[in-house]
Image (cartoon, grey):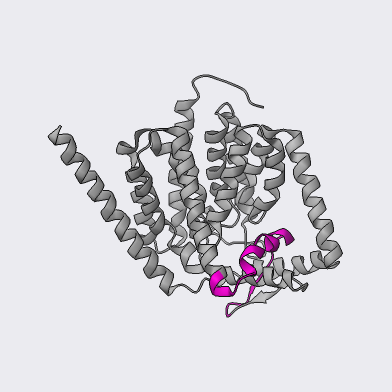
């Protein structure tokens, strides 16, 4: 009994130490960050509130807003406040989303998962997310929406899947195979609801700003030609291959990787919905035509599946990803993390599909 108490004290001390270090990293990085990507979303939402065009060029880096109109609408709750308050709410929303994702998925795989281990995972998310904090990206909010869609698919709530999915198109390049298998799993009704809801929002924006789609195309062209910024974390960039389509994607590689990802997903389609869509999300980052180090949170559902049921044995994966992210300096070498997690998830899928059950 005494040995168990000492062991628990050691474990709690270790978790507290790692969490404290992560908080220091978080606040230090946050103090040095300019959150310029948040400026883009905030400015577009402010323009929407003012009845102006949302397709604008923002800030010292001349960043264009090139997303679908409802992405700007999604940020209106932050834009109704002064910028400093809106940024604070945005940061709080990102943290809450990360906590809910970790808490809900760990509890799904292991109902008695220790609170200390949840805190340890959250601590290792900080070094994994340093570039996201640096630029002010919204991947944790997007991940929260994705996980909500996954839960809706798990519960066969096709209405909720259809209504939420259009908002995932904020970053369609990160969810290509995921989108395909999501609707194969959820069914035609979810797909039709998503299409109808998207059309309704498109009609609303067309009434408000008839030429919005031309402005969006122009913004996409400007965004695609920006190849001198952050390094990509894609397979072509890892090989040093040319990004040969308006600066954003090496199409031959991308198409080959998408085909490979779909073959893997088809092989393991008998998996239950939550692990299957977690595999699909990691497969989507594996074949993404455009991705950066700040998109690593898309691996979190797969990493939770890999580690939760035997966390004492596999916690090192979280530590390794966090440490390697910093050591790699957010370079194209980050793609090795994607390859590692995707490969481990394939093996996990292989060992988990002992009882075939066809879902589609």
Q: Can residue 205 be seen by looking at this rendering?
A: yes
Tell me if residue 299 comes above or below residue 293 in the rendering: above
- Residue occupying the point 63% across, 65% down: 247
Q: Residue at the left extreme?
A: 2
- Counting from the top left corner in percent of width and height, residue 198 is at 77, 51
The answer to whether 36 appears left or right of 328 in the picture is right
Near-viewer residue (225 or 61): 61
Q: Quadrant of the C terminus?
A: top right
Residue occupying the point 56% across, 60% down: 138
Would residue 12 appear left or right of 297 to someone viewing this image?
left
Between 2 and 14, the one lying in front of the other is 2
- Residue stretch rendered in magenta on the structure: 60-85
Residue 341 horizontal/vertical position (percent): 44, 44
Q: Is residue 52 toward the left or the right of residue 257 in the image? A: right
Image label count: 0
Q: Position of residue 285 (x, y in %)?
A: 55, 49
Q: Is residue 173 magenta?
A: no
Residue ID at (34%, 48%)? 120
């Amino acid at each position: 009994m005494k040995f168990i108490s000492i062991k628990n004290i050691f474990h709690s001390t270790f978790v507290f130490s790692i969490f404290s270090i992560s908080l220091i990293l978080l606040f230090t990085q946050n103090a040095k960050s300019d959150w310029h990507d948040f400026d883009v979303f905030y400015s577009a939402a402010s323009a929407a509130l003012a009845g102006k065009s949302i397709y604008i060029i923002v800030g010292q880096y001349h960043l264009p807003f090139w997303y679908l109109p409802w992405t700007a609408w999604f940020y209106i709750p932050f834009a109704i406040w002064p910028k400093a308050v809106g940024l604070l709410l945005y940061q709080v929303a990102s943290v809450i989303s990360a906590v809910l994702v970790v808490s809900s998925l760990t509890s799904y795989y292991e109902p008695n998962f220790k609170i200390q281990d949840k805190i340890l995972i959250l601590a290792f998310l900080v070094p994994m997310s340093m570039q996201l904090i640096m630029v002010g990206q919204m991947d944790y909010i997007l991940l929260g929406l994705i996980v909500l869609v996954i839960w809706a698919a798990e519960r066969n709530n096709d209405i909720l899947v259809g209504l939420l999915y259009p908002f995932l198109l904020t970053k369609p390049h990160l969810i290509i195979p995921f989108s395909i298998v999501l609707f194969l799993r959820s069914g035609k009704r979810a797909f039709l609801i998503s299409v109808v809801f998207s059309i309704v929002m498109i009609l609303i924006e067309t009434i408000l700003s008839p030429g919005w789609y031309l402005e969006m195309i122009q913004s996409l062209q400007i965004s695609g030609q920006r190849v001198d910024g952050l390094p990509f974390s894609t397979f072509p960039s890892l090989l040093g291959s040319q990004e040969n389509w308006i600066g954003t994607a090496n199409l031959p590689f991308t198409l080959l990787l998408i085909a490979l990802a779909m073959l893997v997903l088809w092989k393991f389609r008998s998996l239950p919905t939550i692990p299957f869509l977690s595999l699909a999300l990691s497969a989507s980052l594996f074949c993404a035509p455009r991705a950066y180090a700040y998109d690593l949170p898309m691996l979190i559902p797969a990493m939770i599946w890999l580690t939760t049921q035997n966390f004492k044995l596999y916690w090192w994966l979280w530590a390794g990803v966090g440490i390697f992210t910093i050591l790699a300096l957010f370079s194209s070498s980050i793609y090795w993390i994607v390859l590692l997690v995707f490969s481990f998830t394939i093996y996990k899928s292989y060992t988990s599909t002992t009882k075939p059950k066809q879902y589609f």
